[in-house]
Amino acid sequence: MAAASRTEASRRPDWRALALAAAFVAAIAVPLFLDPQGYWIRILTLALIFAALGQAWNIVGGLANQISLGHAAYFGTGAYASTVLLIHFGLSPWIGMVAGMALAVVIALVLSVPTFRLKGHYFALATLAAGEAMRVIANSWKEVTGGPVGLSVPFTPEDSFWLMAYGAPRPFYWIALGALAVITVVFWRIKSGALGYRLRAVKENEEAAEVVGVNTFRAKLWASLISAAATAAMGTIYVQFNYFFDPDTVFGVASISIRMALVAIVGGIGTVIGPIVGALVVIPLEEVASAALQGQAAGLSAFAYGAILIAIILIEPRGLVALWQRLRGRMSRRAP
Amino acid sequence: MQFLQALVDGVLIGGVYGVISIGLSLVFGVMNIVNFAHAAFLMLGMFVAWFAWHYLGLDPLLGAFLSFAVIFVFGCGVQRTLIRPILKAPQVAQIFLTVGILIVLENAALLVFGADFRSVQTPYQTSAFDIGGIIVSKPYLYAFAMALLSGAAVWAFLERTPIGRAMRATSQDPMAATLMGIDTNLMHMTAFGIGVGLTAFGGAVILPYLTASPTVGAHYVVLMFTAVVLGGLGSVAGAVVGGVAVGIIQSLSTLVFPIQLQNLILFVVFILVLALRPEGIVKRRAA
């Protein structure tokens, strides 16, 4: 029976991998049909960035059920590392990205000591405080971060891949798509590999996992280091795309930490396509709502954002993917 | 002298932190949920008191009772419609539901009240007692006194009344409580209402020395969590002790560190307390 379920399990992801790869190829062509300076290419790029962030969050949040509310700590680290190196040393953001990832790994290592013994709500609280601590540091360490005023990515007159600088959003779309593809593959490999099984053991019952010999600390550590590095890399891409940022945006609880998790939760926590579906729904919805309502009433789009979050959790806590499966199941049952 | 002054200020501010944190602890103790939206109810309480002052001329120290009543009813409604369905849901759903409530309440306030900062004028606002060189600010002192009173009232309610006893029974063993004929759903709703009502009460009494705005709650989120974790999540008296401790830490840290780092110290204390005391917390939950 075990053998049968395993062959079935290995056959099905193949089919899905093919579908996802086809979607990826199709996604490469999408910008060719959009106005290169337009509104939609910007929104789609942002959605891809958040899909990648949701996927990075999913590694710890989804697979191991460690609900982090402080991933902005890594995101902001990536944002500041690459920009500071670019401003002061003229280093390419690609190198800065690697430096930011390394720094994020160090921070994740330091945070693992006090937070890994905590579960559920306590873990969420501790990570929330860690993210906020980073925001306070960035706000007060003016010599490096520019303080509350923020930093701007230096202007480059010509497009340059080496400096990750482009006048139009289109190249960023492809960069973000590439990053999403890489992180998705990493997530997939983890999920179907040995680490994924260990993380799932942590999720189901940590004590039992320990008893049968799973080193839960090491499993959680690997997952969170990979997740931190991926999040930092997206921080670099995000600020190169956005030019300007301040501590409250890149270290923000609502703007980054919650949004990353939200994207994964809305789509389907712990699934491969969850964060992608979630980001493609949440980000355009938010952007369109805030553009349509701009100036009319401050807070309306954020209000809607919160209301959608509540509605999704009350209707189907496992997200849109599960909702879709449920609806499809109901319809096929109804069919003769 | 400077040290003593900081200590006095810390205790006075911390007493209020204690009271606004009681609800967080109570809600966790009774229904095992961390309410991330708790600070938003503090903000709503401040607005209720501000409107009572603006239109009725009610001093916020008295308006606090109105704040409690209004937010109690509102909180019961929120618990009934939004929290009850997810009491048995996975933790991730619980966390993000209350985060969603936080976002909705904050932005609803922004929509309805606007982003302005609103303050009240009271005759005692800028006056203080001078006790042997220690300056005791009157608004701080009054807020502290009101906070302690309400804290004591809640304690008496939980310890001395039949409803309070039923509530404690629900928190200890919901199944056994149900068998004893206690309506646990009603207890959950009442506990949530009292919890957020109390934080609204605390919001009102600090209005004489602070300003109300839709985002004011953000300043209190980590403060409150630190207070309840210090005192032990689920414990009412612990929340008050934890609150006073937080006030003292905050006040004393400004003697040594620049004021911008005040909250950083608190975050570090918070993470350390979480890391060093999880056994105590887990034991409480198992009890």
Image (tube, coloured by chain):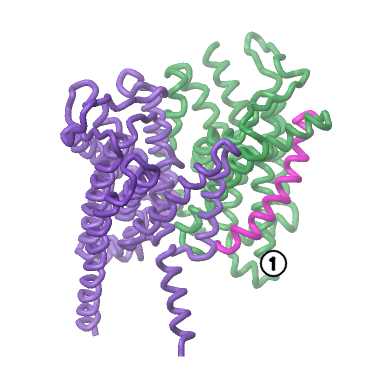
Chain colours: A purple, B green
The residue lying toward the viewer, choosing from B279 and A111, is A111
State the residue lying farthest toward the right.
Answer: B56
- Side of A24 where B38 appears, left or right: right
Q: Which residues are magenta?
A: B59-87
For mark 1, name the chain: B
Main SS type for the magenta part?
A: helix
Q: Is residue B70 visible?
A: yes
Give above or below for B213 relative to A319. above
Q: Evaluate whether residue B235 shows in this view.
A: no
Amino acid type for the residue under numbered disc 1: Ile
**Residue A122 percent across, percent down from the top left:** 44, 49
Which residue lies under the disc numbered 1? B182
Residue A46 image offset from top left, x and y in percent: 36, 45
- Residue placed most toward the observer, B56 or A214: B56
The residue at the point 71 percent across, 48 percent down is B72
Residue A154 versus residue B41 in the image, above or below:
above
